[in-house]
Image: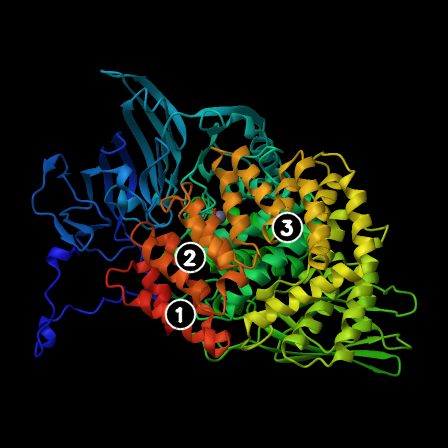
Amino acid sequence: MDIASRPAEPAENTQIADAAPPPAAPPVIRREDYLPPAWLIPEIALDFALGLDETVVVSKLSVRRNPDGNGTATLRLNGDQIAPRAVTVDGTALNDWKLDGPDLLIELAGDAHEVAIETVLNPAANSQLMGLYASNGMLCTQCEAEGFRRITFFPDRPDVLSTYSVRMSGDKATFPILLANGNCTAEGEGEDGTHWAEWHDPWPKPSYLFALVAGELVANHATFTTMSGRRVDLNVWVRPGDEGRTQHAMDSLIASMKWDEETFGREYDLDLFNIVAVSDFNMGAMENKGLNVFNTRYVLADPDTATDADYDAVEGVIGHEYFHNWSGNRVTCRDWFQLSLKEGFTVLRDQLFSADMGSEPVKRIEDVRVLRIAQFPEDSGPLAHPIRPDSYQEISNFYTATVYNKGAEVIRMMRTMAGEEAFRKGTDLYFERHDGTAATCEDFVKAIEDGTGLDLARFRLWYSQAGTPQVSARLEHDGRIARLALTQTVPATPGQPEKAPMPIPLRIALFDRDTGTHAGEHLVILDGDEGSFAFEGFDKPPVLSINRGFSAPVAIEMEREDEDLVFLAANDDDPFARYEAMQSLVLQHLVAAVGGGLDEARRASGRAAIGRAMKAIVTDPELDDLMRGELMILPAESYLAEQLLVSDPGVIHAEREALKAWLGLELADELKALHDRISAVPYSRDAAARGARKLKTQALVLIASGDAGEGAARAIAQYRKADNMTDRQGAVMVLAGLDCPEREEALADFLARYEGNALVIDKWFSLQAGSFHPRVLEQIHALAQHDEFRMSNPNRVRSLYMAAAVNPQAFHDASGAGYAMIGELIRKLDPINPQTAARFVPALGRWRRVEPGRAAMMRAELEKIAAVPSLSRDVREQVTKSLG
Ligand code: PHE
Ligand code: ZN
């Protein structure tokens, strides 16, 4: 609503009926209301006359009555901010179509009709980046989940599968490359400098997998021969000038194709596979059939501009999108409640792939860290939902760590219980049974059950219950028997006050204290509220190693002696368990410190235990540096906050920083020796050199915490000498948090050096916004005014504001200024890009878990957002639930 149409201020006695209506709550969509589509669209032909600010679309649908539908004569075609310019049915112009809100309704007399609809789009004005939009002079599409309805009217639901033929024409100079799904079947020149191309995708697909790209692009080209000997052309398309940074993406694609054949028996099914990198993108990447569209950040990489972590992310996302060709495209989802069917499974597949390409234990540790930082807080907050949700208002809000990462953990548990070989039988059966169809999570579980022989009756609760199970463990020793007593509770979550116990598979081992070994691992399954498991042959109480490899996504509660944790951190033969022991040791200490429960003596003894364990890790000659780096990472502040019902983020931050400073001083000599040793390792992409680079910056962080002067001197030296982005970024990261002249030198040099490179300028923003500099909030406000800041580009917005929202020192500033900053961002961004705006709400939504002073300010920000009358569905849903 603009100012002119707003009603005047209501007079004193204005009746309710005259006042502006309160903002309408968006309708709730429920899983239990699913009905099969009334009409099917076996074929669709799309014709695009392309232009950046005007594209005309003619869509021809073959419409057939679904014998399994409800028999209605009304064809409902979804739309969103589009209008029909012309409609014909069986070649005759139709004038009595109706609009029902955004949807187009057409009455059909028979069982089979041809419907044609013309729409006109303005891609340049599409700032939501859903549907057809312009990015950097090119045109591209994003249709998942409900973007196709912004292009043309269609039954925009994943269980309507159609064969797509696409024709597009446009100015040849503006759009020299024309791409769509499937294979190019014809192309030619038109009049006045135009050209055209026709594409056909033989595989029926839902509308969310449709894609089109047109623009000036160059390809890195290669070929792949599949296991049955078919040749596939591969292209990674980027803007001219970026082609030198595409080889890692291409290598990752080829590795993914080979890996999926070997590990899951899945072969690629078209003659062509295209990847296009675009710089304006809401998410990471999109698995459109045969035409994956990627955020540039998951394609472009070279040593000068990408860190080792960036390289790993490119490999992981390329794998993820490629694996969707089977888990998502060949077998798709019946409805959006089944999203984890494709996402949970595909995340598991990309995790296993990355583990095989690099270090399995390191990958596992990283994945668990992400789960604890991103998913555990979601599961214990106002937005908690099961991996298969029961309802939503805006599906875009459900592309969450729960659906993706917890979804992967749930499938991983089935794999652990079945064993790798049996699990493969289950997945083979799943693909065989459901190929070419739109399936449900239940179909998946059933196939795994039938293929493996597991009984998953109770296990299905993992799909319907939200919340992270809390498992408490106690080990008793009696005679020669060690007895493990376990109990579980699944916490209440919004809409789910009562929970049933779920099967929890726990890999455990019992260590002999004297020899530092164990007699074999056991898999115990806690199936009810409690369970007791006896193990014979222990003369002395053993040390328990539990949830090895993080076999279940649960929180383990157990009283542990520091001594036992130091023992496991040094001796456990499961690398994850070793990491976990170290985490628990630090966590236990910090939780007690934050709770005010540490007197000086206990503080000193706790630190001493951590110092001893850390020293052993820093100096252990047996450890490889990648793993050493994992063991040295301290638990994140958000994970610490998770351990407490209500906490003071300021105290958590101060305690964690104090421990870092203590470690930096206590281990100063060892850390400097480590930094010297690894600084001499020359650049290469092999594991040893990558381990060295990871450690270099970690050592630097601790050195700087203990002695800022020494840290600054070493950091600027590392910066000046760096011949790769990992070292350079690490040095800038450390300097950004220090109040010293070297900070300004490094930041200015970094900006000048990478002028024009958007992905690296993103780093420049996030390194500053994420720093623990005393004036970080002021700096973020200044960065928002910087020439290079753009509210229209999601990567840039995230680089500044997501870094700020997850930076406890900025976000939780005691003044409330951090909350106000994020609140204001959400209000400003919502009209431009609601999907991206909604992603910032959960940070404020954690208010119930924060001390009362800050909680009131967080809540006030949410209320201020809720008061905006024209809020998007995306932000409205998240804010309402967060206040709820
Ligand atoms: N399906 C994409 C993926 O996980 C994610 C995505 C969702 C991208 C919605 C864009 C829009 O691989
Ligand atoms: Zn995915």
Amino acid type, label 2: Arg
Marks 3 and 1, Cα distance to the nearest angstrom? 35 Å
Residue 250 horizontal/vertical position (percent): 56, 31
Q: Is mark 1 within 8 Å of ligand 1?
A: no
Identify the image quadrant of the C terminus.
bottom left
Q: Quadrant of residue 154?
A: top left
Marks 2 and 3, Cα distance to the nearest angstrom? 27 Å
Disc 3 marks which residue? 734
- Per the rendering, the mark at residue 302 is none
Q: Residue at x 55, y 24 (%)?
A: 222
Disc 1 marks which residue? 882
Viewer-closest of 239 and 330: 239
Residue 33 horizontal/vertical position (percent): 32, 65
Q: Which callout, 2 or 3, points at the residue further toward the start of the chain?
A: 3
Q: Is residue 468 visible?
A: no
Q: Is residue 166 above or below residue 879?
A: above
Q: Secondary structure at mark 1?
A: helix
